[in-house]
Every structure is written in C-alpha cells, then in structure tokens.
Amino acid sequence: MDGRLILAFALGAGSVLAVLLWFFLGDFGITWPAGLESQESLSAIVRNWGLLPLALIGMGLAVWRSKIASDQRNIAQQAQFADRYAKAASMLSDSALSIREAGIFALKELALADPEGHYIPAQSLLCSFIRDRSKVYQPDNQTLPPVPKSGYDSTQCESDIKEALRAFLMLRTPETKNIEDRQKWRPDLNGSHLVGIDVRYARPDRWKRIRVPNEVIPAEGIPIRLEFVGADPVRVDLSGVNLMEVNLSGAKLEGADLSEANLGRADLREASLFDANLREANLVGANLGEATLSGADLSDADLSEANLVEAKLESANLGEARLVRADLRKVNFVGAKLNSASLWEANLFGACLNDAELGRAVLNEVDLSEAYLYRANLSGARLCGANLRRAQLDGANLSNACMCRTSLSDANFNGADLSKTCMCDASLSGANFSGANLNGICPNGARLIQAITEGTQGSNVQIDRKDIPET
C-alpha cells in the first residue's frame, strides 16, 4: 500500500467523521438518547469518533511498513540466491574433485529452495558441466571405443559427472517440467560421453533389500544395478532432452523415460533399455548394436538408418515406428508389435520375428532372407520387391498382403494363410506351400500356380480352381 492510497483512505475517513458530527450536532430536532444529554457525554462521543480515522490510518501505515519489509526480505533473499549460484558455479570449475561435488550439491539445493527463479539456471549449468567434463573421456580418433564390461562400476566417468547427472535427474519432477514448458526450455546434453553410466537410484521409502552374494545391503544411496527384491526403482526422466551424439554405450537405463528425446546418432551399443519409454524419440542414425530393448515402447519413434544388429526387442512396441534403411540383422523381435511400421529397404537378414505383429507394415524392398517369422501376423503388409529367400513363415498370416516381385525362393509357408495375397511376378523356386491357404490369390500369379501344379512342395494346398490358369 503506497502513501497516496493511505492519504485517500484518511480523507475518506475524515469525510465520514464530518458527516457523523454534522448529524449529531446539526439542528435536526433530534431527541438525544437517555444518558447522552450532558455536554460531557457528547464530548466523549466526538473524541471516540475522532480516534477512529487515526486508528485506520495507523493500520494502513502498519500494512504499508509490513509490505516494505516483505519486499526488502525478498530482495535480500534473491541477492542471497544469486550469491549462492555464483559460488556454486565457481566451485564447479575447481580442480579438486571434492569441491566440484560440493558445488553440484549446492546447485541442487538452490534449485530446490527457489524452483521458480533458479531451477532453469541450475539445470542449464549442470548440463553444461556434464557436456564439458565428459568430453575429457572421448577418444581422439574416430574409432568406436570398447563398451565397458559390466561390474560394480563399469562407467568411464568420474564421480562428479555421475553426481551431476543424478542431481539433474532428481530435480526433474512433474512440477519442474511445467516450469520447463512455461519457459520453453529443454535440457541439452548434446555430445556427452557417458559410457557405462548407471543413473538408477532408489528412494528410502521404496526399497526392501538388494540381493548380492553372501549379504544384503540397504538400498539407500546405492545404484540399482543388482537384483531387486520387492523394490520399485525410480524411473529416470530424460524425456525431451537433447542427447544427440551422446555416448551411452553400456549405460543402464532400465525403465527410463526417453520419450520425445533427441538421440540422433547416439551411441547406445549394449545399453540396457529394458522397459524404457522411447515413444516419439528421434533415433535417426543411432547405434543400438546388441542393445537390450525388451518390452520398450518405441511407438512413433524414428529409427531410420539406425544400427540395431543383434539387438533384443522381445515384446517391444514399435507401432507406426520408422525403420527406413535400418540395419536389423539378427534382431530378436519375438512377440514385438510392428503394426503399421515403415521398414522400407531395411536389412532383416536372419532376424527372428516369431509371433510378431506386422499388420499393415510397409516392408517394401526389405531383406528378410533366412529370417524366422513363425506365426507372424503380416496381414495387409506390403512386401513388394522384398527378399524372403529361405525365410521361415510356417503358420504365418499373410492374408491380403502384397508380395509383388518378391523373392520367395526356398522359403517355407507350411500352414501359412496366403488368402487374397498378391504375388504378381514373385520368384517361387523351391518354395514350400504344404498346407497353405491360397484361396483368392492374385489371378496373375501364374508362377505360383505352376509351381504348385507341377508338383513342387505344395501338398494339401487350399486353392480355388478358378485361380488356376488355363493351359
């Protein structure tokens, strides 16, 4: 409340007092109440009414002074926060490891104390620290460094980098992510070298015990990289983070939230991403060789030109994902969902897709030679120009699929459903159609009909007689 408002308030109170005095003292012929007819009683009334505006003015002044004091406290507190931020920043550049870790702790505490004012600056500084410090461990040449073997601490990073990353992750909560959205800020860890990093942690209220050889250790403060018994590890939140070209080979990120993250050209070789959320993530050109992505959600993710050789994607969800020209040789897709996924020109040589869902998937020009697709659902899929030589499709559902110009030499279709499938100009040399359902196949599939009617491996084939061309 400023001085002008107080003055206006005082004038208003004085006007009210004048009206009241005029009412009591004016010649209106008013009969005074009993006990108030004496001059002394009238003087007391006037005195009491005169004290009222003074009391109101005093109250206004008290409110004003309280507001000024509050503003001064806020200014002093912001100055204190700024000083804490400056000191923490200077500690991060110190040559002593212990001082750098103390600076990380100071930044975390500052962000917790003043999230609206210092969450973004603290997180930006932590990201910068992680990027700059981790570059020390990047190899000078262009050859890929070896992935560390698993052990108690397989990471190549110093403890200050690990502590900075843990602080960064612990500060990311639904409330602080709302601050990020309001300020349109996204964390940037572009190019960080975090080989073998393990950022999983447990809260004291979420643990029961960790089983290790010959002993049981409380989980508080211990990285969750061992077998959990009845505990629920806190999920790492890296959603929306810029992780382009980051090196996370061998990293432990089970259950991590990487939705909408930018992992373009990232190195994730042998990384553990079991049950991770990679929905709508950018993984273009990423290296996921031998990575574990079992049960992961990769729906709507872009893995174009990514390397997933020998990766494990059992029961993973890749619905509507893009895997154009991806290297998927010998990938384990057992039970995976690839409905409406785009795998144009992908290399799936020797891949295992048993019981996989590939309904309406685009597989044009893909290499599925020697792949395993037992009981796979390829209903409505497009396989134009694909290579399925020596592929195993026993019991697969290929109804309404398009297999024009597809190479099916020596492929097995035992008991497969090929009803209403288009196989125009397909190559069928040595293909096995025993027990297959060929009802309603493309009328132009003369090579298929000829292969079956000439006694190739097609015993017990179901086929409409109208589909056999006249000779």
Image: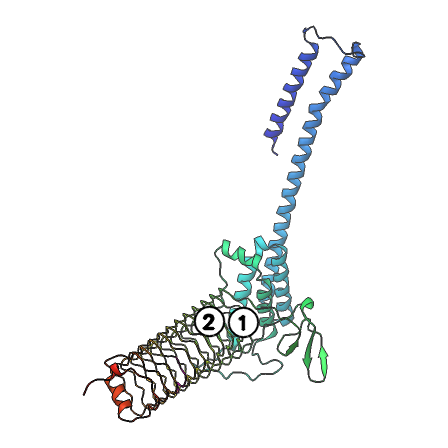
Numbered circle sitting on residue 32: none
Where is mark 1, residue-wise? Answer: 133
Residue found at the far front of this picture? 465
Left or right of residue 439, residue 317 in this image: right
Numbered circle sitting on residue 298: 2
Q: Give the amino acid at mark 1.
A: Arg
First to last magenta residue range = 392-397
* Tag 1 secondary structure: helix
Residue found at the far bottom of this picture? 455
Q: Provide residue 294's location: percent of width, then percent of height.
A: 51, 77
* Tag 2 secondary structure: loop
Image quadrant occupied by the N terminus = top right
Q: Provide residue 50's location: percent of width, then percent of height.
A: 71, 20
Q: Give the amino acid at mark 2.
A: Leu
Q: Main secondary structure of the magenta part?
A: loop
Q: Which residue occupies 49% across, 66% down?
A: 259
Residue found at the far left of this picture? 471
| Residue closest to the eye, 420 or 352 | 420
Q: Provide residue 427's location: percent of width, then percent of height.
A: 27, 87
Crowd class of label 2 (few under 14; some 14 to 19; many from 20; radius 10 Å): many
Image quadrant where residue 414 sits = bottom left
Return the disc, 1 or 2, that comes first in the chain's sequence: 1
